[in-house]
Amino acid sequence: MKEIYIFGHKNPDTDSILSALVLEAIEKTMGVKNAKAYRLGEINKETKYVLDYFGVKPPEFLEKVEEGREVMLVDHNEFSQSVEGIENAKVIRVVDHHKIANFATNEPIFFLAMPVGATATILREMCKVSGIRMDKVTAGLMLSAIISDTLLLKSPTTTDKDREAAEELAEIAEVDLNHYGLGMLRAGADLSEYSPMELINIDSKPFLTNGVKYQVAQINTVSIEDVLKDKEAIEEAINQYIKENNLDLFVFMITDIIENNSQIIVLGKQDIAEKAFNTKLEENTAFISGLVSRKKQVVPAIDKVIG
Ligand code: MG
Ligand code: MG
Ligand code: MG
């Protein structure tokens, strides 16, 4: 029996890695024994913290999929963010919390999308509906994905479902939500070992709207000031990335996970970003109060300008 691959998006974040693992567990409980989680890129420090904490092995790396291979997507649906060969694979399931864009299939599929803070919140709903018991580790993984995507329930993407899920999952996982959550976010905010090019690729996604090709990358920090010390080198990396990928625009979000604001560095068609955020860039950068979500704040604002 061939494996059914489960994976989240490229440049995987915590939700993408953990939701793939959790969906594998759910599928196995429901009798789909050949379902297996994979990753499409390196594990970041935040995700590593979680896997170490709960003693879970990271999924194996998947480079591409062959024609006709059955796959399940979590935490994304846009093919530009997916695995190589996805166009000719057979997508049989999608569980996601992003906008639906450029997605179509030849056959009916299971497609579960909800506007909640994390894919893991939707997976918890699946467990509830199907009467699946969540063990300590699975609950811990779901909780961690929710903490990561909602910045400990502070992002504007956070819904009541996420809050309710986090509370219950923390209890099953036997962790203190705030203490554990802060430890996890801080582990992810350790940027000391990254080169500028790695920094802009930790959590970076491409978008295509009305022919405008743009990229939005985000890093978490406890000190925007510290990151800005490398501003020139970061700008150099962004310019190189723009050139190599033929982009119109690159927005780099440096997000303060304690204060919940972001500094943005913008290169390319800066006027689009200035309109989107109603701001004036100075030396390619601006501080935007309350900005933390790419999905709910950045991408819709940019799409509104170019759409
Ligand atoms: Mg994600
Ligand atoms: Mg997510
Ligand atoms: Mg994210």
Image (cartoon, rainbow, N blue to C red):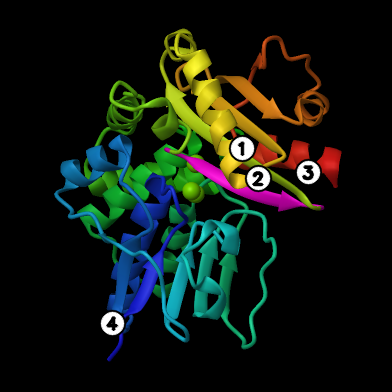
Question: N-terminal of the two: label 4 or label 1?
Answer: 4
Residues drawn in magenta:
202-210
Q: Does the magenta segment cover residue 133? A: no
Q: Amino acid at mark 3?
A: Asp
Q: Nearer the viewer, mark 3 or mark 2?
A: 2
The residue tagged 2 is: 246
Residue 215, image x, y percentages: 62, 41
Is residue 95 visible in the rendered image? The answer is yes
Category of crowding for the residue at label 4, using alpha-carbon neighbours closer than 10 angstroms: few (below 14), some (14–19), many (at least 20): few
Question: N-terminal of the two: label 4 or label 3?
Answer: 4
Where's the N terminus, which quadrant?
Answer: bottom left
Question: N-terminal of the two: label 3 or label 2?
Answer: 2
Snapshot quadrant of residue 106:
bottom right
- Magenta span main SS: strand
In this view, 262 is above or below 90? above
Question: N-terminal of the two: label 4 or label 2?
Answer: 4
Category of crowding for the residue at label 2, using alpha-carbon neighbours closer than 10 angstroms: few (below 14), some (14–19), many (at least 20): few
Q: Nearer the viewer, mark 3 or mark 1?
A: 1
Q: Nearer the viewer, mark 4 or mark 1?
A: 1
Disc marking residue 242 = 1
The alpha-carbon separation of the residues under discs 4 and 2 comes to 39 Å
Q: Amino acid at mark 1?
A: Ile
Q: Amino acid at mark 2?
A: Asn
The residue tagged 4 is: 34
Pointer 2 with pointer 1, Cβ within 8 A: yes
The residue tagged 3 is: 303
The alpha-carbon separation of the residues under discs 2 and 1 comes to 6 Å
Task: Report the residue that reaches farthest toward the left.
Answer: 55
- Which residue appears at 29% of the width and 66% of the height? 133
Disc marking residue 225 = none
